[in-house]
Amino acid sequence: MYIPREIENNILTSLNNNPVVALIGPRQCGKSTLVRHILTSQPNSIYLDMERPSDLQKLNDAEWFLSTQKGKLICIDEVQRQPMLFPLIRSLVDEWGTNGSFLLLGSASRDLLQQSAESLAGRISYKRLTPFLWKELHGTVNFETYFSMGAFPRSILAINPDASFEWRENFISTFLERDLLFWRGVTPSAMRRLWQMLAHVNGQTVDYSTLAKSLGVSSVTVKNYIDLLESTFMVEVVPAYISNTGKRLVKASKVYVADTGITAALLNLRSFEEIAGHPSLGAIWEQIVLSNLKGLFPDAIFNFYRTSNGAEIDFVVTVKGIVLAIECKSSYAPVLSRGNYHAIADIAPRHVFIVSPIEKGWQMKPEMDVVSLNELEYKIREITE
């Protein structure tokens, strides 16, 4: 069963306007499935997987082979494993002078890919695919399942919760024991322990020295490991919002494990009932809101706000220059704290949204709405478009 993805039309538009489009995102988030679906309407195309020996063999003489594919849409999966292809791709697209020549898939971030793809500057458009957004799944699974199993396709569409949990445990092991070998200087056992620590402090500001002391490594190593987890889409780092209020601000970044199902597996939480009774519940709800917003508003700027006096707001989101304050409350009857109101006064956003796991929201005050996850997108678009 193919579940349509929100980004599909955006990719097709970018192929019409650019010689090269790179679809990036974590492993197993559905990139290959989405592209194979797109290719059903692009009969003049070819698909190459850089993890398949037969496809790698075709590129023994890459210049000759790719030159013979002129006029086709050439899709190359896991392209970060063959960085030597980027200069050749630049040369070919300059020679051909047509849009929609290459669709590259990678499980490394734009910044990490650009180390190899600098020669494609001005020729490439980057699109990020996340695991499933809630609006893509709405009506397919219930919200408790989305909460506990996360959004990776093979996890949330598994035949039962046990199969889902097993897939996530295998995903974690495979990422640590195989995928990370591609990056030098990484110790899988230390990375696993760090990842588990981050799950326990999910959504909190990161203290590199404390984590380093617990792991028995340097603060620089911890920072490099977190940067790598972010670059491979395994964590989301949210920097502090710096304002000119004169207040003493918390400036360390917050770190979230990028998928609720992975968080649950790292914490050994097997069901929604276990999550609901766990101290991580609020942070996991923030994680859901953040991942959905990043998927729906890829060009937005995400920060959080906190002062030393306790004023705080979960996310300060800037969309097309418009500043919005977003507070996540896992309660069905959300109430803002005094610290929330102080933060809102400091930030002076255009609008405040309190996001709750409800079906239908209501106005709390002028320019302040309680909203469901489904309502949040169109409410933001009403303000910013």
Image (cartoon, rainbow, N blue to C red):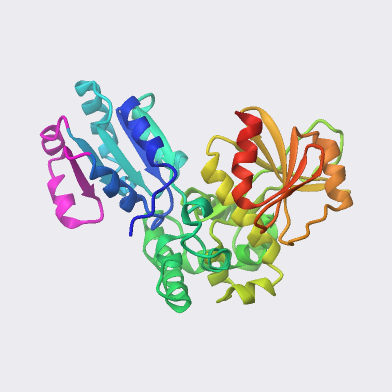
Residue 247, picture quadrant:
top right
Count of numbered labels shown in the rendering? 0
Residue 215, picture quadrant:
bottom right
Query: Residue at (58%, 75%) from the top-left corner?
Result: 269
Residue, far bottom:
162
Query: Residue at (60%, 28%) from the top-left corner?
Result: 385
Horizontal side, residue 169 vs residue 70: left or right: right
Seen from the viewer's position, the closer of residues 311 and 253 is 311
Quadrant in which the N terminus is drawn: bottom left
Q: Which residues are magenta?
A: 42-71
Seen from the viewer's position, the closer of residues 4 and 224 is 4
Q: Is residue 228 positioned above or below 352 on the image?
A: below
Q: Where in the figure is residue 33, as x and y percent of width and height? A: 32, 53
Seen from the viewer's position, the closer of residues 244 and 156 is 156
The magenta stretch spans residue 56 = yes
Can residue 18 be seen from the camera position used here? no
The magenta stretch spans residue 109 = no
Horizontal side, residue 366 vs residue 112: left or right: right
Q: Where in the figure is residue 268, as x and y percent of width and height? A: 57, 76
Query: Residue at (89%, 50%) from the top-left corner?
Result: 338
Q: Is residue 220 positioned above or below 18 on the image?
A: below
Can residue 44 be seen from the camera position used here? yes
Q: Where in the figure is residue 321, as x and y percent of width and height? A: 65, 27
Seen from the viewer's position, the closer of residues 34 and 106 is 34
Q: Where in the figure is residue 175, as x and y percent of width and height? A: 42, 63
